[in-house]
Amino acid sequence: MTSILSGDYCVHRKVCLDLPTVRKFAKQWRLAFATIYSSRAITTSAKKTKKFPRKSPSYTLLSIHDEDQSTRCYQPTSFAIDQSQLTKLVKEKDLHHLQEFGGVKKVASTLETDVSVGISGDPVDLSRRQNAFGVNSYKKPPAKGFFHFMFEAFKDLTIMILLVCAGLSLGFGIKKNGIKEGWYDGGSIFVAVVLVITVSAMSNYRQNRQFEKLSQVSGNILIDVIRKGRRQQVSIFEIVVGDVICLKIGDQVPADGLFLQGHSLQVDDSSMTGESDHVEVNSNHNPFLFSGTKVADGYAQMLITSVGMNTTWGEMMSSISRDNSEQTPLQARLNKLTSTIGKVGLAVAFLVLIVLLIRYFTGNTQDENSSQEFIAGQTTGDDIINSLVGIIAAAVTIVVVAIPEGLPLAVTLTLAYSMKRMMADQAMVRKLSACETMGSATTICTDKTGTLTMNQMKVTKFWVGKNFVAENAYSSASKYVLDFIQEGVALNTTGCVYKLSLGSEYEFSGSPTEKAILSWAVSQLSMDMEEIKKRCEVIQVEAFNSLKKRSGVLIKKSVDDSLHVHWKGAAEMVLAMCSSFYDGSGIEKDLDKDERMKFEQIIQGMAASSLRCIAFAHKQVSEEVTKEKEDGKKIQEDGLTLLGLVGIKDPCRPGVRSAVQACQDAGVNIKMITGDNIFTAKAIATECGILRPGDDASNGAIMEGAEFRNYTPVERLQRVEKIRVMARSSPFDKLLMVQCLKQKGHVVAVTGDGTNDAPALKEADIGLSMGIQGTEVAKESSDIVILDDNFASVVTVLHWGRCVYTNIQKFIQFQLTVNVAALVINFVAAVSSGHVPLTAVQLLWVNLIMDTLGALALATERPTRELMEKPPVGRTKPLITNVMWRNVIAQATYQTAILLTLQFKGGSIFGVDEVAKRTLIFNAFVLCQVFNEFNARKLEKKNVFEGIHRNKLFLGIIFMTVVLQVVMVEFLKRFADTERLSWGQWGACVGIAAASWLISWVVKCIPVTPIFSYLGSKSKKLVRKIVHRN
C-alpha cells in the first residue's frame, strides 16, 4: 500500500479489488489508473512550485488482492490477532470467550499455524513472530556489578576502623611533616586497604559472573516442537507464538498456550497456584496450559499463544531476584571456625593494645632515634594523638590478619573452579552444596538404563507365540498377527516416524525404547505409521509410567467400526494380563499353566542375555464393555491375547566396569536400582562388576522391589546394606532404600531420570539427574545434572567432591599456620619491647598473600589419583584432622622461634639497625608463607612437589608473590617502611624459609601422637556442636 500525497488534511478511501473482478470490470480498473496518474501529476506540480495547497485533495488508497500471491505479500507483523486478544483468551481461562472466537482451531488459523505440521520455522517466519509477539525470555534483575562487591567489602568493621586510622594518621602526618613527607604512613595504610578490598571484590565479582553463566546454561531446556511436519528439539528460548509443542510426562510447559490434542493429560500447577492436586487438561472443559507448570501424566500437543513477559510465569520470574549467595554446609562450618579464630585474634589484639598503651604512657617506648616517645608535660598533643593512632592501627591490623577471611573465599573459589571443571566433565551443578557433599558419599544408588548402559537400543530377538522368528524369516510368521503388532506399535506410542523425502532415511523420535521398536517395525515389518493412523481412531490412552511399566490404547477401526485394545510393556506384566496367545500360524490358543511357564522361560532366557523384554497384547472389545468402563476411565486389561515378544539389547557403556571398580576401591558402595526384571538386572550387574561371584538372591544381594517394600521397617534396616541389585523396583522402593541407608548413617547419592524419581532425588544427600533422558521435574529435584547420562561422569563428580573437601583442608592448614605465627610474634614483641615488628602495611600485605592469593593457589588444585584410594570422609569427621594439627603446630612453632630470634637478636646477628632488622623479619615471615604453600599442597605425602608442573596457576601465583615481595622490600621503602637488603641478607631469608620444607618432611615421618589425638577430639566436639546448632 502506498501513500500518494500527504498534507494538513487527508481523506482516505480504501478500495479492495480482486484480480478476477478487475478483469470483468475494466472501467473500474481504468478509473483507478486515472486516479493514480492524476495524483502523481498533482505531486509533481507541487514539487515544482514548492507550495502545497492548504487542504490537500482526497486520494485513493488501493489494496489489490491476488489470492495466488497472498502468502508472499504480507506485512512483516500482520496477524489477524494481537497479543492482548491472545492474553485475554488464555490467561483469564474464559472457555466461553474461546468458543465464541471459534475454538482452538480458529486461534491456530489466525496465527497462521497448521495444527498437523506446525509453522514453517524458517528464519523470516520466526523473526516475524518474535517481532509481533515477543521472545520467550523474561527480564532479569540486573546482575551485581563490581562496585557492589567493593561496597560490601568496605562495610567490614575492621576495614572501616583501619580507614579511620589511615585518615587520622594522614592528617596528623601532613600537619607535622608537611604534605611531601607526612602522607606516607596514612597513605600507605589507605593504599594497602584499598588493594586488599579491590582484589577481594574482583574475586567475588568473577565468581558471581561464573554462577550467573551456569544458571543460564541450566535454564536452557530443549523442547519437542513440530515444524514443517517434522518433530525436532529446539531451545526453550527459541519457542515462538504459533508453535506446536509436544508434551510428555515430566516436561515443563515452556509458555502459555492451548491444548490441541492428546490423552490423559494432567498438569501439576503447584508452582503457580500452590495447590498440590493435579489438574486435568482437555479440549472440552479446560484447554488452557500455562508456562512453568509440569506434566504429571499423559501426553499432548499444545499451541503456543504467549511467550516470555506476556506469560504469568514470565511476569512472576522477572520480579524475583536470584540470589547466588547460597551458603553451603561447609561454608557454614567454616564461618563458625572463622568466628572462633577471630575471637582469639580480637582478644590478642586487645591485649596488645592495652600493653602498648601502658608502655607508651609510662615512658617505656622509644622512637627511631632511641629517644623516649612520651614525656609527661613535654610531648605535644599532636604527637600523642599520632602515636595513639599508630598503636590503634597496629592492633586493628592484627585483628585483620587474625580473622581468616580467606576461608569463605577459599570455599567460593574452589566451588566455582570445580563447577567450571565439572561442566567440562559432563556434570552441571545446580546446588553448590552438592559439590562438597559428594566428597563424603558412602553409597551411590544408580539406574541401569542409560547410566550403566549406552541407551542405544535395538530389537535383536522376536517371538510370535512360542516360535522364535529369525531376522530374515518374518514372512514365515502369520500376517494376521503381524498386522495386529503393527497396529500396537503405531498407535500405542508417544514416538513418531518422519521421512523428509522419498529417498531419505527415516527419523524416529521418542524414548530410546520407543525408537528401537519403531525402527524395528518400519525396517522389519514394513510398517506404514501414517497409513495405520488414517485407518484407526484413538479413543482412549493410558500412558506409560515407571510405576505401571505398561501402556494401553483403545482404538476404533474405520473399516468396520470395531473396537480394539492394545497393550505394550514389561513382558511378565503383560503376560499376566493374557488368557490366550497366537501361535506362529495365527491360531489363538489358551494360555494354561504349562504354556504360561514356557513363556516365562522364554522371557527369562532373553533377560539372562541382558535383553529388555517387551510384550504386545490385543483384544477386540464390544461397545457395551467400553461404555461400562467409561466411568472408571480404564482400558480393559484382562483376558488379552498375547501377540508376541521382542528382546531389546542395550549394551553396557565402555569403561563402566572400571568406573564401578574405582568407586568400590574408594570405599563407596554401588547399588543398582532398575525397573527391569531380576534376570536382566543380574546379567547387567554382573557385567558391570556390581555383583561379585556368589552374589544372588539367597544371600540378599539381589532382590525385587515388592519384596523389599513388604519387609517391616526393622527388617529393611537389617537387609538394606547387603542389597546390591533391586529389580522391578518402583520409585517408592528407591525412596524407601534412600531413607533406610540414611538412617544407617550413609551419605547417599541417587541417580534418577523420571518424574516419579523426584521424591528419592530430593530425599538423597546428593540427587543426580540425567541430562539426556531426564525429565524437567527430575532435573529440578536434583542437585547435579549428569549431561551425558554416563556412570563414569558420576565417578568424576565423586572425584571432584573429594577434591573440594581436600583443597579446603589444605587452605585451612596454611591459614592456621600464618594466624598462629603472626599472633604469637606480635604479642610477644609488643609485651617485651613495646613495638610490633610488623607494621600495618606489612600485615595487610601478609593478609593479601594469605587470604586471596593463597586461596586462589590452593583452592584450584585438580583431583589426584590418591583421593580415590581413601575411604569416604563421612558426616561427622572434623575438618581439622590430627594430621593437620601436627603440621600446623610444627610449622607455626618453627616460624615463631625463628622470627622471635630475629626480633631480639637479629640486629647483633646481622649487624643492622632497627629498620633493617624489621625488614628482615618481614621478609623472612612472608617467604616462610610462600614456602609453606608448597607444604600445604600435600597433607600427608612427603613429596610436596608431586604434580606441581600441572598446576600452572599455583606456580604463577608463587612467582607473582615473590616478585611483589621484592618490589615491596627494594623499591617501596617509604610505602612499606622497609630497608633494602643485601644479597647475603636475601639469602639468609630464603634459607630460613626453605628450612620449612625439611621440617615438613621430618614431621610427616612422625606418627600422630596422643596430643594431636586430643586436639582432634576437641575439634570433633566443636564440629558436633556446630552440626547440632544447625
Image (cartoon, rainbow, N blue to C red):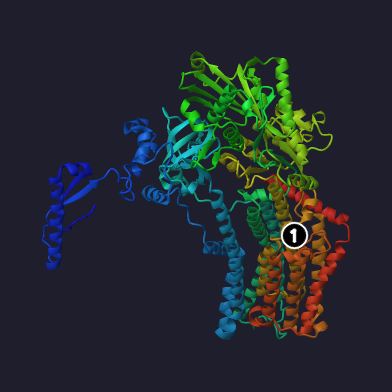
Q: Position of residue 400 (x, y in %)?
A: 66, 66
Residue type at mark 1: give it: Lys
- Foreground: 370 or 476? 476
Q: Residues within 10 Å of mark 1 (few under 14, many from 20)?
A: many
Q: Is residue 35 above or below residue 148?
A: above
Q: Secondary structure at mark 1?
A: helix
**Which corner quadrant of the image does residue 614 belong to?**
top right
Q: Does 136 sit above or below residue 818? A: above
Dividing the picture into quadrants, the one containing residue 762 is top right
Residue 910, position as x, y percentages in the image: 81, 83
Q: Which x, y percent locates residue 524?
A: 60, 33
Where residue 375 sits in the image (x, y, percent)? 68, 81
Asked whether 215 or 19 is in front, the reply is 19
The residue that label 1 is drawn on is 810
Looking at the picture, does residue 713 appear above or below residue 1010? above
Query: Which residue is drawn at the image coordinates 38% and 38% (left, top)?
Result: 108
Q: Is residue 837 visible?
A: yes
User: Horizontally, is 509 left or right of 745 in the view?
Assistant: left
